Image (cartoon, rainbow, N blue to C red):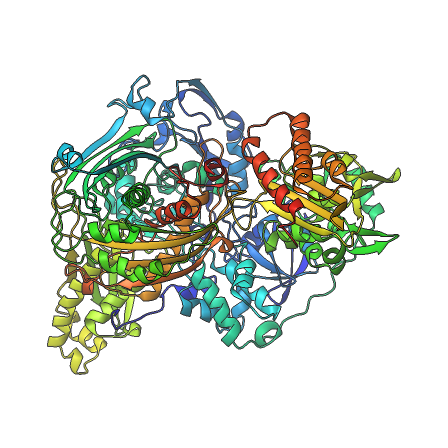
Amino acid sequence: MPIKRYMDRIDAIEKVLGQAKYAGDIHIEGMLYGVIVRSSIPHGWIKNIDFDKALTYKGVIKILTQKDIPGENVYGIIKKDQPLLAKERVRYIGEPVAIVLGEDESIARRASHLIRIEYEKMDVVSDPLQSMNGGVKLHDDGNLLSHRKVIKGDIDRGFRESDVIVERTYRTTWLDHAYIEPEAGLGYMDEKGRLIITSSTQNVHYKRNEISRLLAIPEERIRIIQATTGGGFGGKLDMTVEGYVALSVYHTKRPVLIRFTREESFLSNTKRHPLLIHYKTGAKKDGTIQAVKVDVTGDTGAYASYGSTVCLRVAVHATGPYEVPNVYAESRMLYTNNPVSGAMRGFGVPQIAFAHESQMDIMAKELNIDPLEIRIKNALKRGSKTATSQELGTSVGFIETLKAIEPFWKGRKKSGTRGFGLGSMFYGMGNTGISNPSSARITLTEEGKIALHTGACDIGQGSDTVLLQILCETLDVDGKDVLLVRADTDLTGDAGSTSASRQTYISGKAVQLAALNLRAYLEKEGFYRGRGISEIYRSYRDRGFPPFEGYFDPPTEALDMDTAKGKPYATYAYATHMAEVEVDRITGYVKVLRVYAAHDVGKAINIKNIKGQVYGGIAMGIGFALMEEFIPGKTESLDNYYIPTSMDMPAMEAFIVEDEEPTGPFGAKGVGEPALIPQAAAIANAITDAVGVRPYELPCDLERLKKLL
Amino acid sequence: MERIDFILNGKSVSCEVEGDEVLLYTLRVRFRITSVKEGCGIGECGTCTVLIDDEPHYSCLTLSTKISGHDVKTVEFLSLNGNLHPLQEAFIKAGAVQCGFCTPGMLLSAYSLLLKGKKLDIQGIKEAISGNLCRCTGYQQIVEAIKDAAENGKFGGEGNGRKVEKRRSPPEGKGIKEILDMLYEKEDGRIIAGGTDLLVKARKKGVYNDYIDVTSINGLKGIREEDGRVIIGATTTHGEIQRDPIITGKVKSLSIACGLIGSPQIRNMGTIGGNIINASPAADSIPPLLVHDGVCILESKEGIREVPLSEFVVAPYETQLGKKEILTAIKVLPLNGYREGYIKVAKRAALAIARLSIAYAIKEKDGIIEDVRLAIGSCTPMPFRAYDGEGYLKGKSRDESTIAQGIKSIIDGIVDKSGMRPSYVYKLPVLMGLLSDILGGSYAH
């Protein structure tokens, strides 16, 4: 049962009316437009930049390069290794070199084509395995960004005690978030000389910090406001346009808008990490998994972005949602001259899920055990120990997700080239083994409203609505009694990034705690006996309000650097998807006919939002499995990067499992990334069931599948 | 600059626009209507969708100079009377809105569908919104919302109970002569029809053209029968061809092919003439036209000439069209009593470029192949008629060995003509499989 207080999405009305203002929709009289000039080669020294023609182009106001950056020309969410504008060297195609500012967008764009950059080309590293062997050094501290191990039990003994061993290699490629709104941001100086930026983003506070360092001005002089954001999926966590907007406003003192075209978005945004996964599984005859050994090599591209996060998360999730006594998972992330890979819905887990779920099905076949049975047999449950030796205490609804799918699995009817496949997953909520708190604050207004201030960015997934529902449920008030002040560094505290499926769970909890503080106060003040908020506001105004604040940092423990022993997450989400596909043997075309998806969300706050996440995750999973592939140097726009259309979507049904998580608000956990993670794996398994061949590389598109048939 | 007058959301408006300006720019910059979004600028995402005369179009690929006299609607039209339209209410209720960036375009495609007043099934709804990409929702709640609005929404007829200005008739069309004069006058004059290929190229290459719009020519649009031939005007859109009774009856593979081009928006915009002149190896309309012995009718000041389509396309993206010449129509042979169809192999179900395509028409009597016509697209550098194979098959009885031999001669012909291309590793086996099904009768359209 979901919580009592249901709300339709609070942002939906302005969106259906076409009135929602995305950053690129904002217009300020006299504003300038910025266009980024990018490197056309993957690796080289910049010898000379010829600006003459561009500078004299009518309507061009200024051209900025790295020399114009007053502070430190480096940023990065975890490791600061990426220049805002290339210093003397470029490391990937599309690396920003200069900003052209013009009176209108087409002026800036046309002028940007007139800039000539001379390079001295350098050897290119395009393969992480080649990068590992040295040769070309991409950064001063070497080419290995990150190397993590998860060790549990005795891996050799595990394999010795196994009756069957399955060993395979899996590959995935670059994917693009392809949010429908390309990156955009607008900045200006206010009358007090403060820098105000409103942009399409997943985290306002982080960006304020980066801009402060880039411009060498204190954070108090900067205000970042999230504009309505048209999707993120991880791609708007890193700095996108904000640094360029900030630098441009700093130098021109005029309002500046920078919006990426789709082509620029493809060229510049971070990609899903391509992974090469060697996977070895050992099991007893009865299907009990004894040992899992995994070796992952990832390509993080020219700069770090979230590479080390993906590196660790992949290793921590390598076994999938199964209890395995002996684990040796090793993961490396290498620099190359490829596009920068970063955060994308699931931080590497969708890739590793493709591997562990394929392994599960291969093992089931080897042992002649039903795929559902082998999953139930090895499933994580209360009391299980994960690969990091974390004992799972509460909210482990994995088996319930399998049970929810069971009737459809048992009722499946194979015919012709139709096949069925399962995919399961677990996913740690929030950041891995580090503190990642959120805060919330509530104020009362003179007009009699209860105002929630949260730094959480709603990027379309619906956190604004969910957080207000939690507020209303806790206070026992209606939607009309509350209002939201959101994602604005001046008005809201830090809620952390909208990532890692953490906002409902972590920010939701912070809201609940703040609301409980307020509730105690309101009880005292007679609110629940009929005294209005306006009256309470007036009677207290002069004395000053006590702070109605909430703060929550999920209880985690740092992981051991050598073995990753510890408690990386306070809790996990679990899910199982089942896909039915039909394969055309002649063309290699796969049609996904039907998907059932069951998710343990702890507690449902908003069922429509959850289902929306699940259906959207299925769509992205279909893209990952069958059609999406970013090819560096080739993929330019949506005409050669296919994402699923309405016609590619199957019939879908989503089931909600509620195994409440005591640390979450009303027991809730997250669902944003889990929705995607098992889908591609389920399709790969269904293809195998349909035609007897197994894809080891995604996307399993026409050519790749035909080759196997 | 050129002055345009049109109806925008029920009101007459006018403004000055540049010759190469697209409607997306005009609406966003000159009218500050920002509900019309740019998601790609090349007609692939649908966020810029507007209704022109109540049909969805991509405003990013529509020249503003074309819309004089027409009726343009953006999502603001739906709530003109200050109340939410039943579709908008249904979107909110169903949870069909997430990030919202696709929402205005999606609503307009849905509104256009509802205006047609047809009974809706899930497939029909999915098809109607197949030109609008959404990355958040998986489309499910959007489809539910449209279905709900269609079944339960109360619509107040045209304008949903609002007072709207009716559009006046479009400005008088031009004569061919007038267009030819322009073509001779303008050094860099570039003929444009639907714009769905040309404006994409212009964006990619960063060139800015002096466009001459042939869709304004009187009498260049439409389908008629004449002297045992079907004449298709060059500016007839893919959508019009797809639905035309003459085409669905006698040029069936062309109807199917046109129905598989791009998305509803592209089919409302793109023209058959444009598809031919663009001469892409993957052009969907060309194989069916080859099957029907298509002949291009070309006109210039020197006069009118006719060139068979098989000779007209001389290389990928290159035709025999003279610099000062216009393609006015394509003439095809109607086929009766044939088993006919078009197969498109593509990576996704809509908005896709063909990886391989086959148009076919086969006439049989008592197990004997009386006539067979096969044209293959997206394989060799240009779509082609498989005359070698046809010649072998004609007059023979349809048995396995005949079919196998016929297919062999087609494949040999391809390799002889173009050598072994890397893509053939995939394409030739697929082609063999599909031809075997077609000739064997498994595809019975």
Q: Position of residue A371 (x, y in %)?
A: 30, 50
Between B212 and A658, the one lying in front of the other is: A658
Instruction: State the image quarter where residue A564 is shown.
Output: top left
- In this rendering, would B257 be left or right of A607? right
Q: Is residue A97 left or right of residue A168?
A: right
Residue B445 is at least partly visible in this image: yes
* A494 shown above or below B320: below
Residue A698 x %, y %? 40, 39
Q: Please state the horizontal and vertical placement of residue A187, each as a whole percent of the image.
A: 38, 46
Q: Quadrant of the C terminus of chain B?
A: bottom right
> Residue B93 occupies which quadrant of the picture?
bottom left
Number of numbered discs overlaid on the protein picture: 0
Residue that protrudes farthest toward the bottom in the picture = A530
Q: Is residue B130 left or right of residue A413?
A: right
Residue situated in front as seen by the camera: B414 or A669: B414
- The location of residue A516, given as percent across then percent down, is 15, 67
Residue ID at (56%, 63%): B124
**In the shown orientation, is residue A59 left or right of residue B267?**
left
Looking at the image, is A655 positioned above or below residue A383?
Answer: below
In terms of depth relative to the viewer, which is nearer, B112 or B296?
B296
Residue A600 shows in this picture: no
Q: Residue A549, located in which quarter of the rendered image? A: bottom left
Identity of the residue drawn at 30% across and 54% down:
A576
